[in-house]
Image (cartoon, rainbow, N blue to C red):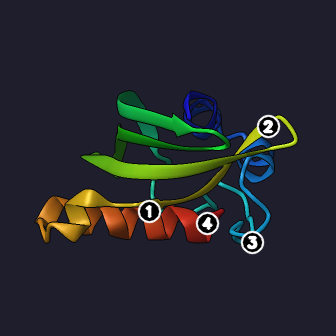
Amino acid sequence: MRARYSAYVAGDDAFIAASWHATTRVPMTSLNHEPGAQAPTQWLGLDIRRHEAAGDTATVEFVARFKTGGRAERLHEISRFVREGGAWWYVDGSFPDAQAGSTTGSKTATMTKARTQKQ
């Protein structure tokens, strides 16, 4: 999880794609913004809240803080990972704040959807 966060901070599209499980990977485009697009995301910090591993599966709950367009946001996600061939792969994530119906959760889900579409 920390490696994927670091890849987002560094804009390392290749690592993000390479660490995403082939069965759930979305088509990847550059994480870098085109001219005239919204300001790039500035990642501010990662808080790992919970990690649970059971054999070849794991879940990681985290909150990533970021700023985009001068506005501070947070991404609260519970990510699922699977280990295959000795490597851990990101499978997918759920968004607890969105499920609870909070405004922050809705913003988080929207940001994540946009992030995924840009990847």
CB within 8 Å, label 1 to label 3: no
Q: Residue at x 65, y 36 (%)?
A: 7
Where is mark 3, residue-wise?
A: 27
Check the picture and name the quadrant holding the N terminus.
top right
Decide which of tag 2 and tag 3 comes sooner along the chain: 3
Residue occupied by mark 1: 112
The answer to whether mark 4 and mark 3 are in CB contact below 8 A is no
Q: Nearer the viewer, residue 81 or 77?
A: 81
The image quadrant that residue 34 belongs to is: bottom right
Of the numbered discs 2 and 1, the one sitting upstream in the chain is 2
| Percent x, y of residue 85 | 88, 41
Measure the C-alpha gap from mark 2 to mark 3. Answer: 21 Å
Between the C-alphas of marks 2 and 1, the distance is: 24 Å
Q: Which residue is mark 2?
A: 87
The amino acid sitting under disc 4 is: Lys
The image shows residue 75 at horizontal and vertical percentages of 34, 49
Quarter of the image for residue 23 reads bottom right
Residue displayed at 71% across by 66% down:
25
Secondary element at tag 2:
strand
